[in-house]
Amino acid sequence: MRVLYEIAQGHKIGEAPTASDVVRALDLDAGYLSRVLRNFEKRGLISRKTSAKDARQSHLALTARGVKMFAPLEQRSQQDVAGMLGKLPEREQARLIASMATIETLLGEPAAERSYTLRTPRHGDFGWIVSRHAELYAQEYGWSDPFEGLCAQIVADFVNNFDAKRERCWIAEMNSENVGCVMLVKDPDNVARIRLLLVDPKARGLGLGQKLVDECVAYARACGYRKVTLWTHSVLAAARHVYEKAGFTLTASEPRKSWGQDVVAEFWDLEL
């Protein structure tokens, strides 16, 4: 079925794969695949066409008989998956999909080939910060609408009271798409505060979260702040790891009921 699926996908999009393509896609032994393909040919399920670019290679395609055999099997597979997903609430389905996207990113294209850039905000970026926080935290943690309101208030305060000499916002961009952000804002008593750190699932595994926090710390030092502080939650394990690696220390924590969930708020500080 796995071999038939690979051939069927090429059949659908008009890019018939070669045996070598199937070997690479499924990590199969070439000899084993050759025996499977011979069996399929004898049963009239596939056809071969010599490649115009390389006479040693043949493109594989399903015959009409092969399509007829494969279609109900694919439909049954889709029904099985739909049955599994149907047991989950819509929010949990979204969370599952986001997690799968993270796995695909980490195990797919090498990190060295996925690069990002940091820049200052442009028109529309502040709206994106609010909406992406709301979407992602609802998907991954079930946080409700008041969290979006909080994000909107933080962004509004930053924009309306922005001090260009003491505050800054970074937007991370990859392939012309926003994939991360963070803000550094001023608090009383010469203290800087990190706010709204976010790394989109498609950019995880690149060290982007650490880079954004390091930029905040370096900027705070350059501005002469005596301390950097932040507020996070115990469930945000990846962010907590980033803060700890950057030298922050957990100074206080308290259980709360926020955004429809039981959470543990945490306060972290870094003396400069």
Image: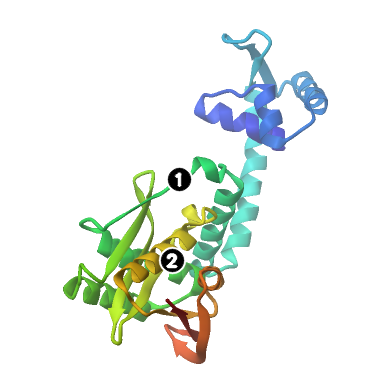
Please state which of the two labelled residues, at mark 1 or mark 2, is closer to the viewer.
2
- Which kind of residue does numbered mark 2 sit on? Val
- Horizontal side of residue 30 vs 237, given as left or right: right
Reply above or below: 107 against 230: above
Look at the numbered disc 2 and give the secondary structure of its residue. Answer: helix
Q: Which mark is residue 115?
A: 1
Q: Hey, what amino acid is under mark 1? A: Ser
Q: Which residue is denoted by mark 2 in the rendering?
A: 213
Relative to 210, is 57 on the left or the right?
right
Q: Pointer 1 and pointer 2: residues touching (CB < 8 Å)?
A: no
| Residue at horizontal 33 percent and vertical 60 percent from the top | 170
Quadrant into which the N terminus falls = top right
Distance of label 1 from label 2 (alpha carbons): 17 Å
What is the crowding at mark 1: few (fewer than 14 residues within 10 Å), some, or many (at least 20)? few
Sort mark 2 into few (<14), some (14-19) or many (20+) by Cα contacts within 10 Å: many
- Which label sits on residue 251? none
Whether residue 207 can be seen here: yes
- Sequence order check: which comes first, mark 1 or mark 2? 1
Residue at 26 percent of width and 64 percent of height? 126
Residue 24 percent coordinates (x, y)? 68, 31
Chosen colour scheme:
rainbow
Residue drawn where x is 66% and y is 34% of the image: 25
